[in-house]
Image (tube, grey):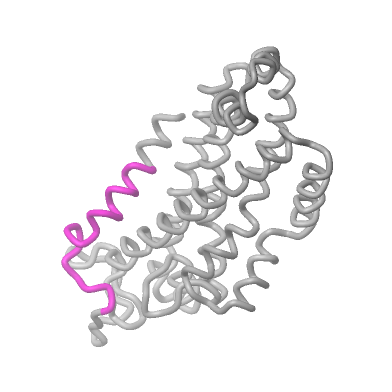
């Protein structure tokens, strides 16, 4: 499972990075006389409604999706790790305030909150990332807090505290390492969720704006040609499904490897 996930994700990453060499076409170049042409040797994924090469646009869209996924996971994990660790270790009013904030944000459906934030901030890639971070750090904070609450009472933590170690050192050296395996799995699955969320926002016109290729905008543009040009939706749809499936395989495999008890 973990090998299959690594192969899928690694292949998608290589394809995204090597996009300019895999396809000789400009993602914005138009060949209007050939618009909606199906797959061929010259254009393996066909052409879209403006005569642009679909393969090239799928490869560029892969870079957008991976950028969003990695950015959202990196920032969300750091913010959630910090808040969850401080809340779980110190407890008291700090833990109470953090817990109420987490409960408040979890009470709203994540995608609806992201839609509202992007609608207020404006549809741009950096604002999409910001909106997804606002809803994404909560899961990391909740997981970290639960692990820290359990870990802070262990004997080696109590011994470090009795030896005069500072709280910051105890958290970094003794408490957080216990949370790393679970957070690694959470990050892998969270990246898949961020990619789906970005595609959803772009599909609704709230994400990446044309002419920049995005899997979500490609699905939106192709839904009007499901009968006469299904390749416009099939290939970006397969790309999204493959990458998300690979990330889920990778996350499940990491969970089994890092926690054999299941």
Left or right side of 126 for 92? right
Left or right side of 71 for 118? right
Query: Is the magenta region chiefly helix, strand or loop?
Result: helix
Residue 99 spot, x, y in % from top left: 79, 46
Left or right side of 148 for 249? left
Residue 237 spot, x, y in % from top left: 46, 60
The residue drawn where x is 59% and y is 23% is 174
The residue drawn where x is 55% and y is 31% is 180
Magenta segment, which residues? 9-28
Tell which residue pokes out farthest to the front in this image. 164
Q: Nearer the viewer, residue 247 or 229?
A: 247
Q: Nearer the viewer, residue 236 or 113?
A: 113
The residue drawn where x is 19% and y is 57% is 22
Q: Is residue 11 magenta?
A: yes
Residue 127 spot, x, y in % from top left: 53, 70
State which quarter of the image contains the C terminus: top right
Left or right side of 19 for 211? right
In the rendered image, the vertical position of residue 48 relative to residue 199, given as above or below: below
Tell which residue pokes out farthest to the bottom in this image. 33
Q: Nearer the viewer, residue 207 or 81?
A: 81
Quarter residue 152 falls in: top right
């Amino acid at each position: 499972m973990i090998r299959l996930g690594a192969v899928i994700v690694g292949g998608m990453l290589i394809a995204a990075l090597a996009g300019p060499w895999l396809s000789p076409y400009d993602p914005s170049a138009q060949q209007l006389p050939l618009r909606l042409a199906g797959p061929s040797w010259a254009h393996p994924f066909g052409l879209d409604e403006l005569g642009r090469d679909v393969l090239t646009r799928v490869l560029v869209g892969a870079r957008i999706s991976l950028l969003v996924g990695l950015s959202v996971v990196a920032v969300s994990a750091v913010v959630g790790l910090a808040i969850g660790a401080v809340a779980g270790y110190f407890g008291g009013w700090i833990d109470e305030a953090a817990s109420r904030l987490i409960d408040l944000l979890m009470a709203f459906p994540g995608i609806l909150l992201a839609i509202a934030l992007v609608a207020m901030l404006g549809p741009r890639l950096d604002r999409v990332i910001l909106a997804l971070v606002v809803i994404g750090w909560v899961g990391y904070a909740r997981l970290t807090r639960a692990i820290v609450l359990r870990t802070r009472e262990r004997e080696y933590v109590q011994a470090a505290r009795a030896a005069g170690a500072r709280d910051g050192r105890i958290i970094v050296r003794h408490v957080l390492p216990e949370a790393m395996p679970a957070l690694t799995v959470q990050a892998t699955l969270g990246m898949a969720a961020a990619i789906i969320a970005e595609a959803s926002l772009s599909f609704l016109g709230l994400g990446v704006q044309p002419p920049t290729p995005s899997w979500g905008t490609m699905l939106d543009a192709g839904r009007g040609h499901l009968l006469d040009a299904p390749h416009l939706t099939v290939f970006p749809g397969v790309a999204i499904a493959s990458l998300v499936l690979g990330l889920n395989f990778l996350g499940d495999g990491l969970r089994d490897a890092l926690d054999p008890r299941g």
